[in-house]
Image: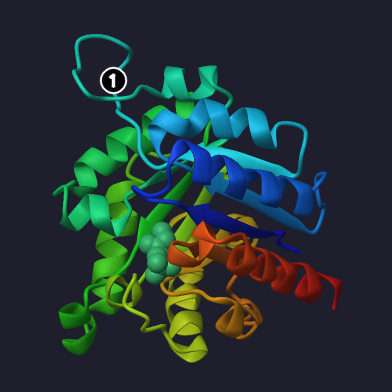
């Protein structure tokens, strides 16, 4: 049985103060490691240390939203995986649609980062997902195949204990539009079968596939109850404890069923 992962991607939001308050509220709600549900927050880089100290010893892990693929050196403005592990990060989100579409990261860039982060022992949350126009022209599976093939190129089966996939249809991110549970399930099933074909049935069975895109307290349970949905990557609703906590609770309730 796959363990739910509920992750908050704070994107370029919060202040030191508001992020600290949010982290405190979450750490007191998830006081210790919950075997049923893994909880993660991904604050902006400048706040990683502060947030890490606040959630330390609680059941809330913390991760970054990006990293660079080179070892520390002359790369102005970049953040190495060594720095992330140094401040205690557990995870890193890679290939987010905003990095792909706004910052123009390619599958090759993402693949270099994935391999570097895996080497550093970080958990990688690899995001994939199609644009609205790609869905409308029946390209969803082609896009997912390209992003999975590109992002995971050269990644050995032995690394899968550290890999989580996040299906985030771009048209559902920050728009209030959510993939229907059926649309999410169909994409997740495609991704699971992809893992089976490219790696193995065991890897397909054990790898978690999160859904992201306008997850809110009122749709979380339905999305998380789909057979192949193993958690949520939450943007907007992860910025408010009163919205994020009910999403965690939905996962806790479902894992008890
Ligand atoms: O991009 C997302 C998480 O990475 C989803 O964002 P929203 O939940 O704001 O749609």
Q: Nearer the viewer, residue 69 or 50?
A: 50
| Residue sitting farthest toward the top | 73
Q: In the image, residue 65 lies at what x, y percent? A: 40, 42
Q: In the image, residue 208 lies at what x, y percent? A: 59, 59
Left-right relation of 22 to 112: right
Quadrant of the image containing the N terminus:
bottom right
Q: In the image, residue 27 lies at what x, y percent? A: 72, 45
Under circle 1, the secondary element is: loop
| Residue sitting farthest toward the right | 256
Left-right relation of 105 to 159: left
Q: Is residue 73 visible?
A: yes
Question: Is the residue at mark 1 in contact range of ligand 1, meaning its CB lies under 8 Å from it?
Answer: no
Up/down of 25 relative to 17, above or below = below
Ligand 1 found in image quarter: bottom left
Left-right relation of 123 to 53: left
Up/down of 66 relative to 75, above or below = below
Quadrant of the image containing the C terminus:
bottom right
Q: Residue at x 80, y 74 (%)?
A: 253
Mark 1 packing: few (<14 Cα in 10 Å), some, or many (20+)?
some
Q: Quadrant of residue 70?
A: top left
Q: Residue at x 68, y 51 (%)?
A: 26
| Residue sitting farthest toward the front | 17
Q: Is residue 194 visible?
A: no
Q: In the image, residue 8 lies at what x, y percent? A: 52, 55
Q: Residue at x 54, y 21 (%)?
A: 87
Q: Residue at x 41, y 84 (%)?
A: 179
Q: Which residue is mark 1?
A: 70
Up/down of 191 relative to 68, above or below = below
Left-right relation of 194 to 32: left
Q: Nearer the viewer, residue 20 or 122?
A: 20
């Amino acid at each position: 049985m796959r363990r739910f992962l509920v992750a908050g991607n704070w994107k370029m939001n919060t202040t030191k103060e508001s992020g600290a308050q949010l982290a405190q509220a979450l750490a007191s709600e998830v006081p210790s490691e919950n075997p049923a549900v893994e909880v993660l927050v991904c604050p902006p880089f400048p706040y990683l240390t502060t947030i890490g100290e606040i959630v330390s010893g609680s059941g809330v892990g913390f991760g970054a939203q990006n990293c660079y693929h080179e070892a520390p050196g002359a790369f102005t403005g970049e953040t190495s995986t060594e720095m992330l592990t140094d401040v205690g990060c557990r995870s890193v989100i890679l290939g987010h649609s905003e990095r792909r579409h706004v910052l123009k990261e390619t599958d090759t860039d993402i693949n270099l980062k994935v391999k570097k982060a895996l080497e550093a022992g970080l958990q990688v949350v690899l995001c994939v997902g199609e644009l609205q126009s790609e869905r409308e022209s029946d390209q969803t599976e082609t896009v997912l195949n390209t992003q999975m093939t590109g992002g995971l190129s050269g990644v050995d089966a032995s690394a899968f204990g550290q890999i989580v996939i996040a299906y985030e249809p771009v048209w559902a991110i920050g728009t209030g539009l959510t993939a229907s549970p059926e649309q999410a399930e169909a994409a997740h099933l495609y991704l699971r079968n992809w893992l089976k074909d490219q790696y193995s049935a065991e890897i397909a069975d054990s790898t978690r596939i999160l859904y992201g895109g306008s997850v809110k307290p009122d749709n979380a349970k339905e999305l998380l109850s789909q057979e192949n949905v193993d958690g949520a990557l939450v943007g907007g609703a992860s910025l408010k404890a009163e919205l994020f906590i009910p999403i965690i609770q939905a996962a806790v309730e479902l894992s008890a069923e």
